[in-house]
């Protein structure tokens, strides 16, 4: 890990400082962002993929996953070795900044808030902003825009916050960067179109990597809902509304968020989750963003504690 074995204080402080960097500074420039570099590497692989041969595409997809996730993990190992040779007062902010590039709580909430603000005066603009969160039909009406935005906030609580923090706490920078590589590959390759076979390994790897974090994210939403006295509804929705036929993870946090908010979230032609206890107005996006802030903040605090405990245990 980034921290020296036994230095549990540095382990926890790295996560907390990364959280402060995220809230205060947001995202680094694209030219310096590791996820952008990963995307370029994946794009280069995809430009050379075989076409029309399912077995060859499947094997090539496995190669892409191994090469990209492996490169990310090795980069994390190299960074850890370099940081381990620096004074703690240099290694701490440098390592925290690298960790911050693997997750984005502020950016996720801001994307949702942007759609919320646009809905007040510009439905067309809200649809355009929604594309930064999720791919949906370009002719959604305002309630469906609200639904899609809230669904994306809930689902991306796992991808953008909980998963990278958990893998950092367990495996340090190599784990966080490797997870981010797998998730980026799924976002670029894991579709049921002409990329189905080449992206199948990436999609399944992402499902496996997110299985535990998705359930932790749902529990964090339930915990946040306790502050609004809707924890029982969130818990019930988490247990009864999840639709595994759409994937082992996809609808779990979405259903939990629907229960916490007391709304029905719907993807046309697919699922309807929750019950329509209140209308889907722009204000509901603000409520969902609040849940994401609280759950995401709790995830940062929990990851800091877990990292510290594991560092102390490793030195025992």
Image (cartoon, rainbow, N blue to C red):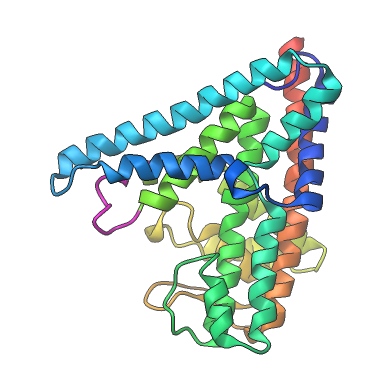
In the picture, the quarter occupied by the N terminus is: top right
Magenta span:
191-202
Question: Horizontal and vertical percent for residue 178?
Answer: 52, 33
Numbered label tally: 0
Is residue 206 something that shows in the picture?
no
Specify whether residue 302 is painted magenta.
no
- Quadrant in the picture for residue 174: top right
Residue closest to the far left:
53
In the rendered view, tell whether residue 58 sits above or below residue 280: above
Residue plotted at (58% across, 25% down): 76
Q: Quadrant of the C terminus?
A: top right
Q: Position of residue 271 (x, y in %)?
A: 43, 72
Foreground pick, 107 / 260: 107
* Whether residue 2 is situated above or below residue 16 in the rendered picture: above
Is 199 contained in the magenta span? yes
Residue at point 54% right, 43% down? Answer: 35
* Front-most of residues 86 and 10: 86
Residue at the image point whose x is 39% and y is 60% from the top:
246
Relative height, residue 313 to residue 114 (above, below): above
Instruction: Say which quarter of the image contains residue 277.
Output: bottom right
Q: Main secondary structure of the magenta part?
A: loop
Q: Is residue 114 above or below residue 51?
A: below
List x then y, in percent, for residue 264. 57, 78
State which quadrant residue 88 falls in.
Answer: top right
Q: Nearer the viewer, residue 249 or 51?
A: 51
Q: Is residue 24 visible?
A: yes
Q: Is residue 87 left or right of residue 85?
A: right
For the point 80% across and 68% down, the residue is: 228
Across and down, in percent, residue 33 comes to 60, 43
Residue projecting furthest to the top: 316
């Amino acid at each position: 890990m980034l921290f020296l074995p036994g230095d549990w204080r540095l382990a926890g402080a790295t996560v907390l400082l990364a959280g402060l960097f995220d809230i205060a500074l947001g995202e680094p420039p694209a030219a310096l962002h590791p996820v952008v570099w990963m995307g370029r590497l994946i794009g280069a692989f995809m430009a050379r993929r075989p076409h029309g041969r399912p077995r060859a595409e499947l094997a090539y997809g496995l190669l892409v996953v191994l090469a990209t996730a492996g490169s990310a993990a090795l980069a994390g190992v190299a960074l850890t070795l370099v940081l381990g040779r620096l004074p703690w007062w240099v290694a701490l902010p440098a390592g925290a900044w690298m960790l911050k590039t693997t997750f984005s709580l502020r950016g996720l909430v801001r994307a949702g808030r942007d759609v919320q603000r646009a809905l007040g005066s510009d439905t067309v603009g809200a649809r355009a902003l929604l594309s930064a969160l999720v791919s949906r039909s370009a002719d959604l009406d305002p309630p469906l825009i609200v639904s899609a935005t809230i669904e994306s906030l809930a689902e991306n609580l796992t991808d953008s916050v909980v998963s990278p923090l958990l893998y950092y706490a367990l495996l340090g920078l190599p784990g966080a960067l490797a997870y981010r590589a797998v998730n980026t590959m799924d976002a670029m390759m894991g579709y049921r179109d002409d990329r189905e076979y080449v992206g199948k390994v990436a999609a399944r790897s992402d499902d496996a990597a997110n299985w535990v974090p998705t359930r932790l994210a749902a529990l964090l939403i339930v915990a946040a809902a306790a502050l609004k006295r809707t924890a029982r509804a969130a818990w019930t929705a988490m247990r009864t509304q999840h639709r595994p036929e759409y994937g082992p993870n996809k609808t779990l946090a979405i259903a939990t968020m629907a229960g916490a908010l007391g709304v029905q979230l719907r993807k046309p032609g697919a699922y309807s989750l929750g019950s329509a206890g209140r209308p889907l107005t722009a204000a509901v996006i603000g409520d969902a963003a609040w849940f994401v802030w609280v759950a995401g903040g709790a995830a940062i605090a929990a990851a800091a504690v877990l990292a510290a405990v594991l560092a102390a245990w490793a030195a025992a």
